[in-house]
Image: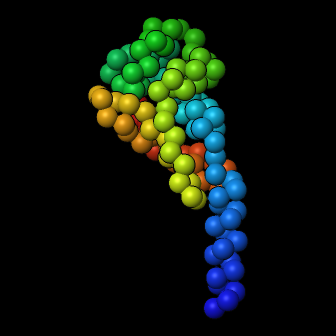
Amino acid sequence: MKTLIVILVVLAVVMFATRPSAEKHKTAIAERLVALSQQQGSALNDSAIVCWDLKGLNGREALNVDSVAQEVGKQLEVKNFWLCSVGSLKRDGKQQHVSLGVCGHVFCTGLKP
């Protein structure tokens, strides 16, 4: 029983220490948005990814991760919990979860074409 408790405590400490920062969330979301826009064509349109109010990028032919990350960073809200972090963007006046960060990795959960 002591071994199980020690393992759980060590796992919790590792998860806490490796919780991703807001910058990692911003970069992961931007990379996902650029990849989705390339799958859909050369430019974003209002019915696709721009639903997260990234209208400043609408119509640009060459999207890069840095420009998208800058726009995402203006609206991204990252809440840090003890063992993970959750990133949210505003959509239709509501916060929508779009990323989950755990153990140094960020998973984009709410981004669809």
Is 18 located above or below residue 49 in the figure? below
Which residue occupies 51% across, 23% down? 74
Foreground residue among 96 and 42: 96
Choose top left, top right, bottom left or bottom right for residue 9: bottom right
Which residue occupies 54% across, 33% down? 29
Tell me residue 8's x, y (percent). Answer: 63, 75
Tell me residue 81's x, y (percent). Answer: 53, 54
Choose top left, top right, bottom left or bottom right for residue 30: top right
Tell me residue 99's x, y (percent). Answer: 50, 43
Most extreme residue toward the left, as rendered?
92
Is 34 positioned to the left or the right of 8 in the image? left
Is 54 positioned to the left or the right of 83 in the image? left
Which residue occupies 64% across, 38% down? 24
**Residue 38 visible in the snapshot:** no
**Residue 66 visible in the snapshot:** yes
Tell me residue 64's x, y (percent). Answer: 61, 18
